[in-house]
Image: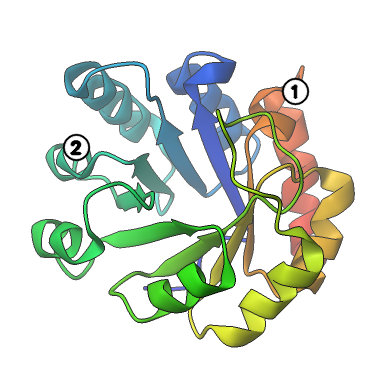
């Protein structure tokens, strides 16, 4: 797998229709979008992912949150898994070697375990307090993020409470990408805010 884009955009249904959000994110220059919709069944999520893929720019990556079955049926670029989702080894056997698989981690120990699994990237967070997730895990902070980035070999995607003002500190700590939800899809003009992030990430 080639390196992930530095901006990892998440179209979370908690902030509106993920298809509409994804269109605006792509219009703003995002090259990777994770579709996150925990409130619908597999059928509706599949329709949303397939709709996004129809207008995704050439070379852009569409990942599915949690649902390996949907990622497989939609022929998405891959899946993002949580600690309580399908085991990574099973997901890899289903999706194949070319699929992108990421795993959420919330501590140094979990990140070290993930580094030994067949994943393409390790998500670490929350870095800052976040309201985008029910019952979030304890905040890691920049120092612990730096420790994780130094300890693992695989790319680290930092997530949780990241804003444009905080993105520089996160990348300086060693993260390969910043995963952003609220500060993108919760913005008044999603496309323009995405352009700000893309410009920043190109120069960070």
Instruction: Name the image quarter holding the N terminus.
Output: bottom left
| Residue 41 locus on image (x, y percent) | 23, 18
| Residue 143 locus on image (x, y percent) | 80, 71
Residue at 44%, 42% (x, y): give it: 57
Q: Which residue is mark 2?
A: 74
| Residue 17 locus on image (x, y percent) | 48, 14
Q: Residues within 10 Å of mark 1 (few under 14, many from 20)?
A: some
Instruction: Name the image quarter holding the C terminus.
Output: bottom right
Are the residues at dot 1 and dot 2 in contact (C-beta closer than 8 Å)? no
Q: Residues within 10 Å of mark 2 (few under 14, many from 20)?
A: many
Tally of marks: 2
Numbered label attached to residue 72? none
141 and 97: which is toward the camera: 141
Left/right of residue 21 with respect to residue 195 in the rendered view: left
Alpha-carbon distance for marks 1 and 2?
28 Å
Check disc 1 and report its element: helix, strand or loop. loop
Q: Which residue is mark 1?
A: 187
Residue at 59%, 18% (x, y): give it: 15
């Amino acid at each position: 797998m080639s390196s992930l884009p530095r901006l990892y955009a998440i179209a979370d249904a908690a902030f509106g229709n993920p298809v509409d959000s994804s269109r605006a994110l792509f219009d703003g220059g995002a090259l990777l979008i994770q579709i996150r919709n925990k409130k619908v069944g597999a059928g509706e999520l599949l329709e949303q992912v397939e709709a996004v893929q129809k207008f995704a720019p050439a070379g852009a990556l569409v990942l599915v949150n949690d649902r390996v079955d949907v990622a497989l049926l939609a022929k998405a670029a891959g899946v993002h898994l949580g600690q309580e989702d399908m085991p990574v080894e099973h997901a890899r056997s289903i999706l194949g070697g070319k699929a992108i698989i990421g795993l959420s981690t919330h501590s140094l120990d979990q990140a070290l375990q993930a580094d030994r699994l067949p994943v393409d990237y390790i998500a670490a967070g929350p870095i800052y307090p976040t309201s985008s997730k029910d019952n979030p895990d304890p905040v890691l902070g920049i120092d612990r993020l730096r420790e994780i980035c130094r300890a693992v070999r695989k790319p680290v995607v930092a997530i949780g409470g990241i804003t444009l003002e905080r993105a520089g500190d996160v990348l300086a700590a060693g993260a390969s990408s910043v995963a952003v939800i609220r500060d993108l899809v919760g913005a008044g003009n999603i496309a323009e805010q995405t352009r700000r992030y893309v410009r920043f990430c190109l120069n960070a």
